[in-house]
Amino acid sequence: AGTYVVTGAASGIGHAVADRLRTDGHTVIGVDLRDAEIIADLSSASGRRDAVAAVLERSGGRLDGAVLAAGLGPAKGRERLIAEVNVLGVTDLLEGLRSALAAAGNAKVVVIGSNSTTTTPLVPRRAVRRLHDGDLDRAVRQIRRRIGLSAPVAYAASKLAVSMWCRERAVADEWAGAGIRLNVIAPGPVLTPLLRAQLDSSTGKQVRSFPVPIRQYGTPGQFADWIALMLSPSADFLVGGVITIDGGTDALLRPDAW
Ligand code: NAD
């Protein structure tokens, strides 16, 4: 049995993953705003620092894996918060936990991205680059210029930036060279409180019109199963992957790209 850190462990996909790992006999260190072993706010630099310190202390400096599931969905006016949590809430945490992951020898990391990265139009590439480089102020200013679209654009840009960061790190000496397998899972719509909030919001109609060829939403339990597989020895050869699991949307919109 191993020790795993799971951010966003209080709800949705993170909660389902934490349950699944515990059922399989592993130790889970959950990180969330509430209902978790470590209560931390990943939207601030000090919250992220405290979270890293608390995880290192609880784990004794050795982690078999990490699942970065804390995240915010698209909501107008929250562009800055989305960038903080969805990008820095992943990258700052992983930088801080890298040595503990390296200590395990063959650690696995799964970051939750999104198929919004390949299905959202009009995402300014420069904003993605700035998010990736940690220049949140300028990135958010540019995103807010997409009048009427700033929430979905902020969300997609945050997931693009974090996915790029993961693919670059995944193959670097300090990561792959240290036996750490870093991968991204990119879900389409999954029935969690995050999706329900969107369906119930003023943009609910747009969310419902998002084409999903299989005509159903994913469930947190399915994603717990996929992520458990990505943390298992079966995934020893999976490095820098972005695994899209979305009921067919990405294939529908981009049949020539994979
Ligand atoms: P959720 O809202 O059910 O769970 C997200 C968790 O993150 C919550 O427990 C929340 O408290 C935590 N969180 C949010 N802000 C935080 C902060 N500042 N500090 C610490 N914790 C914080 O959402 P979910 O649908 O399970 O989403 C999990 C991940 O999956 C997110 O990264 C989301 O972007 C991604 N995702 C979800 C969907 C979907 O349709 N549900 C689709 C694609 C990607």
Image (cartoon, grey):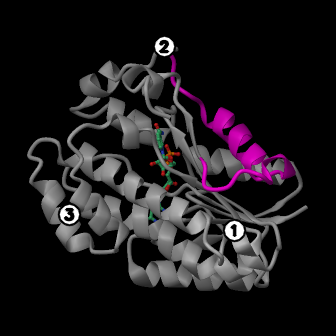
Q: Secondary structure at mark 2?
A: loop
The residue that appears at 34% across and 74% down in the rendered structure is 134
Residue with the mark numbered 2? 215
Q: Secondary structure at mark 3?
A: helix
Q: Earlier in the sequence, mark 1 or mark 2?
A: 1
Between circles 1 and 3, the one closer to the viewer is 1
The kind of residue tagged 1 is Ala
Residue 25 drawn above or below residue 176: above
Q: Say if residue 79 shows up in the picture.
A: no
Q: CA distance from mark 1 to mark 3?
A: 32 Å
Instruction: Give me the C-alpha separation between circle 3 and circle 2.
Output: 34 Å
The residue positioned 51% from the left and 84% from the top of the image is 49
Position in image of residue 182 (x %, y %): 64, 60
The kind of secondary structure element at disc 1 is: helix
Amino acid bearing label 2: Arg
> In the picture, which quadrant includes the N terminus?
bottom right
The span picked out in magenta is 216-241
10 Å crowding of disc 1: few (<14), some (14-19), many (20+):
some
For label 1, the residue is 176
